[in-house]
Amino acid sequence: MPEYSFRRALEAIKPYKKGEDMEEIKAEYGLETIARLMSNENPYGCSALVKNAVVKAMNEPSNYPDDYTTAPRAAIAKKYNIDKDEIIFGNGTDEIIYFLGKAFIEEGDEVITGKATFFSYEESVLAMGGKMVYVPMKNHGFDLAGIIEAITDKTKMIIVCNPNNPTGTVFHEKEQLEFLARIPKNIIVVVDEAYAEFYMGENYPDTFSKINELKNLIILKTFSKAYGLASFRIGFAISNKETITMMTRAKNLFNVSAQAQAAAVAAMEDQAFVEMVRLKNYEAIKYLCTRLDSMGISYIPTHASFIMIEYGSDVREVVKSLLKCGYMVREGDMFNMPGHIRISIGTREQMEGFANALENIISSL
């Protein structure tokens, strides 16, 4: 060990489990293709408009990107009818989650979230010496009343994800309004809407209309999911101007590449692509749920681009067997849901192949 020391806060952070090498897996199991059903990636790629925009953005690779992110900022402001200075961009939403820690969390501050939700929230808080407070889920969704009850004089922030990753559950407009009204104004409320575009029902919260009324509200959005730009790494947050100004002080300069900015603008111009993704995702979910029902496998009804199934103690063997068949899925342990498997929703063809593989594995165990 080196003689110098690290910040003690880092000891509490669990290292992210590195994904397995695709080519090595193919060689080991004699596979030609692998369906990546573990990272909630868009199986339909991205809009055809993106490629030309990115190629054009490569004309001046020696220049720094626009740090103000002028073009995507204007496009988002127009789409959501907000002010351009109410937006901050990050190298993916993950970076913005780290901005939250850097901008708001002091040592000893408490942050409340659900027991089974996105792991990056924890990493951001623990890195700054904060403490996570986990409220058990209610029917696999956020127990909003339980979160209110967990507030103490040390509570600095509350984070909820809607739809929630990994359970796919949703809380609606009335529930969110009642929840926000009960939170003291000195506590920051972060609503992560990374998967909102996949929701096909009614009464989804209009969170954007509240950002100037509720100064403690921050909304997270991403281009990685429905827009299919995960490799470009671009996400954004929306809040009132004062909050965004302070969060910007926690941001690195030139954190979003020129190519990512161009890709985001082009992707936003093609809402027909997003609608196609939503519809195909919905149809693939319906098909997969029918197959899971026929196998007698329990699952959590989802409103996102993934589904969590319950399998029990044999879950690791099932995950390994699926990998041998060419289907990479995620164990629920990293989301505090042992005995579960999260499956990204792929194309109809991928879902058929996955369901067939799972059925064969079940019959052989």
Image (cartoon, rainbow, N blue to C red):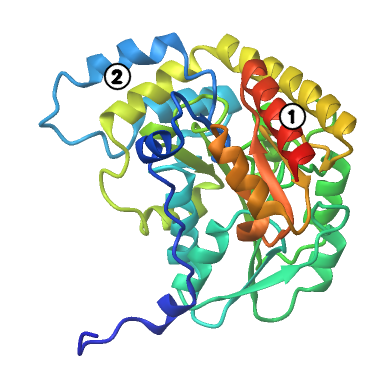
Q: CA distance from mark 1 to mark 2?
A: 29 Å
Look at the picture and state if 342 lies above or below 274.
below
Which label's residue is closer to the chain start, 1 or 2? 2
> In the picture provided, is 144 more to the left or to the right than 79?
right
* Residue 259, visible in the rendered structure: yes
> In the picture provided, is 220 more to the left or to the right than 296?
left
Q: Tag 1's secondary structure?
A: loop
Q: Choose top left, top right, bottom left or bottom right for residue 1.
A: bottom left
Q: Residues within 10 Å of mark 1 (few under 14, many from 20)?
A: many
Between residues 135 and 315, which one lies in front from this camera angle? Answer: 315
| Residue drawn where x is 74% and y is 40% of the image | 364
| Residue drawn where x is 67% and y is 46% of the image | 318
Q: Position of residue 123 (x, y in %)?
A: 50, 65
Q: Choose top left, top right, bottom left or bottom right for residue 61.
A: top left
Residue underneath mark 1: 199
Look at the picture and state if 202 lies above or below 108.
above
Residue at the extreme front: 364
Q: Position of residue 158 (x, y in %)?
A: 67, 62
Image disc number at residue 54: 2
Image disc number at residue 279: none
Q: Position of residue 138 (x, y in %)?
A: 86, 57
Q: Residues within 10 Å of mark 2 (few under 14, many from 20)?
A: some
Residue type at mark 1 is Tyr
Q: Position of residue 206 (x, y in %)?
A: 74, 35
> In the picture provided, is 199 more to the left or to the right than 35?
right
Number of numbered discs overlaid on the protein picture: 2
| Residue drawn where x is 43% and y is 26% of the image | 74
> In the picture provided, is 21 more to the left or to the right than 81?
left
Q: Tag 2's secondary structure?
A: helix
